[in-house]
Image: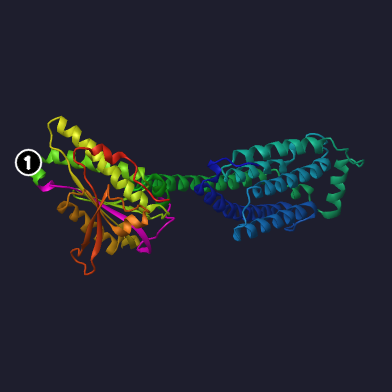
Amino acid sequence: MKSSALDRLPELQAAEMQADLLSAFVRVGILAVLLATAVLSAGDGRLHGGAAVDIALYGLATGASMLLAWRRLYHPLLPYAFATFDVILIVAHMQVMGRMMGLDTDLVAVPAAALMFLVLIHASMRYQPALIAYIVALFLVSVLVTSLLPAPTMPMPMAMSQQMAATGHSPMGEVFAFDVLPPVLVATAGAILMLGGYRTRQLLLRSIDQAARSARLSRFFSPRIAERLSRNELYGPSSGLRQPVAVLFVDIKGFTSMAETMSPEELGTVLSEFRERVTECVFRHGGTVDKFIGDAVMVVFGAPISGPDDARDAVQCGVDVLKTVAEWSRERTSSGDAGIEIGIGGHYGEVFVGVLGSGRLLEYTVIGDTVNVAERLERLSRETDCPFVTSRTLLDEARIPNDEARWSALGEHTLRGRTTPMEAMGLKHLKDHCEDLTEDLPVAR
């Protein structure tokens, strides 16, 4: 039996595992109800003949179901196997008792046939329409086949009389009395349906919650990363790990002066458009928007999911951002608005990656010296004619050769807050030929 792509979703797989355990507990409940009803229906408080055998067999299947579920040994065919056992057991019981009652063909008139509704309701907890269809088809075929079997030579009504005389109780106790079975089935089916409704509601609430979390995360992460974070697959609260990442800081130059001449509404529009354009570039290259800091954007490549091309993706993203903002700036100046210039700083190194905080104040972020260096290199871009300043480490990790036509060696700089000098490299800014920035960076293979 082939599964669709939807059936392989982690949410549905987890729901199937939970349904397996819950189904086993439901079988225990059904076993207890059947046992109590059979004992009460027998009259003498004891199980006799076929009832004892049937309930013992059902008990063995229930024990196997509980063991498999408890050890989390799930397989998609297991529900079908247990459903097959239940149907065959019920039909066999109907066959025996139907012959004893003289019902050679109309086996569904046997009270035990009503137990099929319990099997169907129990199976409905798994949310598998194919399983329900299988149970119905198997039951109909089994009834048809057993009804065609040759009847015993002894008249069945006489057999019932002989059994009553020999045992002192009615064989109907073995299939539950007519006046006992209907209310028992209604009560049991109602309980299972209530449990199924509760499961449906819980799954729906979890789905809504995950969708809401994914929507919030998608503002900062690419869809692939947001989906994993929304399932808590990466980090728990106040936890994380150390790993190498590439960090970019993108900032608007002269933003303070711009703010003096703009209304709050205009300023908000500029910031929104700036963030939107930067975010599109970041997601296009598989990065993560760690945070917005006023007119600055902190971008991370390699967290929460690292890859071999994180540094290269970061450098190409920086160039893409320069190109995008240059085009936006030309659009603004052509309409009479002030142009936009940005500076970008980038570095590659080890950081702490994880979730910080407690309670409601949780923040996914990266912290460490690498972040500080990237921010300081962005400030260095304002002192040079290079809009994109990186560490030599980032270019080496990105496998970008020392191309003097594109990159300038800015020498070693002792950045604020650090004692160790940092070798900086700057992407040359051709002010009159911004289209040059659209070309792919030369990458050493």
Q: Nearer the viewer, residue 184 or 62?
A: 62
Residue 262 point in image, percent of width and height: 9, 40
Which quadrant would residue 232 be assigned to in this image? bottom left
Instruction: Tell me how many marks there are.
Output: 1
Which quadrant would residue 57 be assigned to in this image? bottom right
Colour style of the rendered protein structure: rainbow
The residue tagged with tag 1: helix, strand or loop? helix
Residue 299 point in image, percent of width and height: 29, 51
Q: Residues within 10 Å of mark 1 (few under 14, many from 20)?
A: few
Residue 414 point in image, percent of width and height: 20, 65
Residue 273 located left or right of residue 113: left
Vertical position of residue 350 compared to residue 206: above or below:
below
Magenta residues, start to end: 230-256
Q: Nearer the viewer, residue 142 or 265?
A: 265
Residue 96 located left or right of residue 70: right
Can residue 95 be seen in the rendering of this structure? yes
The residue depicted at 17 percent of the width and 49 percent of the height is 385
Decide whether residue 237 is among the magenta residues: yes
Vertical position of residue 363 compared to residue 142: above or below:
below
Can residue 278 be seen in the rendering of this structure? no
Report the residue marked by disc 1: 261
Disc 1 marks a residue whose amino acid type is Thr
Residue sitting at the far right: 153
